[in-house]
Amino acid sequence: MKKEKMQIIENIFRNKVRKDSKIENAYLLVHSDKLGLHMNVAEGSTGNINANPQQPNYMASVGKLFTSTIISLLHERGKLSFNDKISNYLDKELINNLHVYKGKDYTEKIIIKHLLKQRSGLYDNFWPLLEKIFDDQKFNISPREAVIWGKNNLKPFAPPGEKTKYTDTNYHLLGLIIENITGMSFDEVLKDYIFIPLGMMNSSMLYYSKPLKEYSYPMANFSVNGRVINDYKRFAELDFAGGGVVATNEDLLKFMTALVTGKIIKKETLEIMKNDSSRLHFGIEYGYGIWQFETIPILLPEKYNCWGCVGATGSFMFYHPRLDTYIIGNFNDTSYMRKGLKFMKNIIKELLK
């Protein structure tokens, strides 16, 4: 029965990829000790190389969960508090007039958890700057400069703490806070705080670092609006702490297992990350880098409740507590920004049968 269920899920996955011409390659891992299941498959190709389950993937905003976990580690170690003002950890030039809304400066009102849960009221600098990178081959911008550009060219949408809006600016700021507290670059913190302790040998930060063990296969191609952007190294600086993690699915499983079982942060800290949340979309609560399905009678029954993180390339990394199951995957194309999450829910539906 287990083999039959896995075969059904694998067929659904492979048929999905084969029928959609936009998808060059895709990856799926399903693991459950409770159900006695482990499947790690790939479909498609990267150039002239067939997709392999051991290929590293750029995980887009799934990386935000790594950033929020590092902030939580610093919280546990007494280096910061979730309720601290961000002005305690950022220089005056950067934060001067950072959040001016309807003529009033709210910068001093922004606290760290506003950034974590997308409640700062700040603008999203990512997509307009990405267009500049595509349009101008000479355009280059650092994470710090990206925040300053947003301050000078975009407008906040609400006072801090009043509304939820998904924005990479919040996670750029978290990355800069991490660097200022630790005295290390963000990629070094990723390695020392997460990759090394968890034995994530096949993980890195996009164009910032190399894995602890050399990759056996090239990174899978990923596309934004139909454009393969693996070679746009300037993109990596823009992404930064908002989603620069590159990893194999097996390494991502190590991270999620450690998070669930309290091996990287305390379980009570994880509960804060999950439950200090607000509605991001219909049926979805957003905590500290965590997406969590909320129960909606008939439309989204309790049996679908799970939590994890989603990326713009159709990437997802979720844990389903009732099934004690991890579901990790990537379609590597922004046309699956929403469809990737829908596909993941269909996998849960099959597992529940």
Image (tube, rainbow, N blue to C red):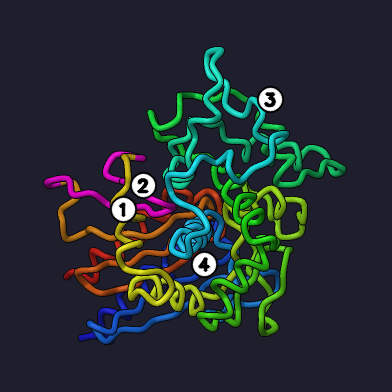
Q: Quadrant of the N terminus?
A: bottom left
Q: Quadrant of the C terminus?
A: bottom left
Q: Is residue 136 left or right of residue 299?
A: right
Checking the image for residue 292, the label placed there is: 1
Q: Point out the residue furthest to the top here.
A: 103
Q: Is residue 140 left or right of residue 51?
A: right
Q: Badges 1 and 2: C-beta atoms under 8 Å apart?
A: yes
Q: Which residues are magenta?
A: 280-298
Checking the image for residue 283, the label placed there is: none
Instruction: Indicate the secondary structure of the residue bearing disc 2.
Output: strand
Residue 174 vertical position relative to residue 231 in the rendered view, above or below: above
Spatial CA distance of label 3 from label 4 is 36 Å
Q: Give the residue number, with chain letter if any, for mark 3.
A: 153
Q: Amino acid at mark 3?
A: Asn
Q: Badges 4 and 1: C-beta atoms under 8 Å apart?
A: no
Q: In the rendering, at what x and y percent does residue 221 appear? A: 65, 64
Q: Earlier in the sequence, mark 3 or mark 1?
A: 3
Q: Give the residue number, with chain letter if any, for mark 4.
A: 26
Spatial CA distance of label 3 from label 1 is 32 Å
